[in-house]
Amino acid sequence: MSKRLGVGFIGSGFNTRFHIQGWRGVRDADVLGVWSPNAKNAASAAKLARDIGVGDAKAYRSIGEMVADPNIDAIWVCGANHARISNFEEIVAAVKSGKGTLKGIACEKPLGRTVADAKQIIKLVKSIGVPTGYLENQLFAPHIEAGKKLLWARGVATTGRPYLARAAEEHSGPHAPWFWNGVLQGGGVLNDMLCHSALVVRYLLTQPGEPLSTVKPVRITGHIASLKWSRPAYVKKLKSTMQADYSKAPSEDFASAMIEFETPGGTIAIGEATTSWSFVGAGLRLSAELLGPEYSMKWNSLDSGLQLFFSREVTGRAGEDLVEKQNAEQGVMPVVPEEYLAYGYTNEDRHFVRAFLGEEKALLDFDDGLEVVKILMAAYQSAEQGKTLAFPPKGLDTFVPQVAKGTWRPK
């Protein structure tokens, strides 16, 4: 078996560029291709890969052309949510036609906009028998990995299982217009980002080396709200910058889910997941906590250990050179060096490369991605009904959130 993997990316936006930058720490693979519906962006992303020395990447005219290239061994699907199924249909068609072969397909969150979509994608990929990987960078964040390992080795081993996990992802809003469109994206911030937090809490509560399924969700309480972006001044701003009219079809900018899990010993553990597009701070803030009988851990990505200060005399254009989703250029500013590493992209990509090369077992596959979508849809159902639901609730396979239909209105 080859000890190097040639990887092609579907999508050329913000997420793909984080992966490409994170590839600096991947030794067994090269970024060799990018396809995007925006040819200019695809060329730019491919140039980034070449410029930082992670692969002799080129832009392709189609997904089929990229899969057919014998130098491409695996595909990372990082395109827009509303194109997810069509992207997979093109991948599968290229493989079935005999034009190309693949050793693996990795897909960014969410696997699908609904449970039905996610199941259709799994069916498509199973028809060609290609190994899969569900991309969830925060599980691979160094602080999450180290904290979990140490707590389970020292605290849990001597005093018992953890019983409460919390995780949050918060920032001021997405970069691209389609994220703000509930119909295209499949919802609002719950669908966009609670996928991270809901999986992190389950992961932290799961014994190392055991499957996530050993910590079983049994009840879920979801809540959604539009706290900021439905206010008149911000409706106007969003319409001019992101072509989204939240006076007519808003999406939630705040979401939370309380998930009650049953552990292997029959005890109950609680996961609290929170996420927001209405956070005002230095920039993207990731946080996590894990609590047990005689121990705890906490992580806040903005507590990076590096701060800069700029007085009012320091002026210039707005940017994101200090932290993702940066909201200011003056005052005391935290800096997150090598964000792609801090947020888990490097460790994630290194892991799935090794998994597709047959050197280790994939931590997450598309079945895990489906389970995340089920939790998200259950949270939406709970929010719409205003009550706690047993998991899995009825009608999950056919459920489409009101936000995704364009019919939701904040109270």
Image: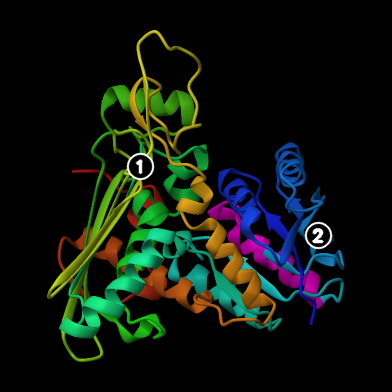
Residue 85 - label: none
- Which numbered marker is on residue 305? 1
Q: Which residue type does callout 2 highlight?
A: Met
Q: Nearer the viewer, residue 47 or 231?
A: 47
- Would you say 276 lies left or right of 367 here? left
Label 1: how many residues lie within 10 Å, few (<14), some (14-19) or many (20+)? few
Q: Is residue 260 left or right of residue 50?
A: left
Residue furthest out toward the top: 313
State the residue position of label 2.
66
Q: Secondary structure at mark 2?
A: helix
- Decide if residue 97 is on the left or right side of residue 378: right
Q: How is the image coloured?
A: rainbow
**Residue 320 can be seen, yes or no:** yes
Amino acid type at mark 1: Gly
Disc 2 to disc 1: CB gap under 8 Å: no
Magenta residues, start to end: 76-96
Percent from the top left, x then y, of residue 73?
A: 77, 70
Q: Is residue 212 above or below residue 317?
A: below
Image quadrant holding the N terminus, namely bottom right
Residue 87 image offset from top left, x and y in percent: 67, 61
Q: Quadrant of residue 328?
A: top left
Measured along the vertical axis of the image, is residue 176 above or below residue 293?
above
- Measuring 38% from the left and 66% from the top, which residue is drawn there? 146
Q: Nearer the viewer, mark 2 or mark 1?
A: 1
For the point 36% across and 49% down, the residue is 189
Element marked by disc 1: loop
Q: Position of residue 96 (x, y in %)?
A: 79, 77
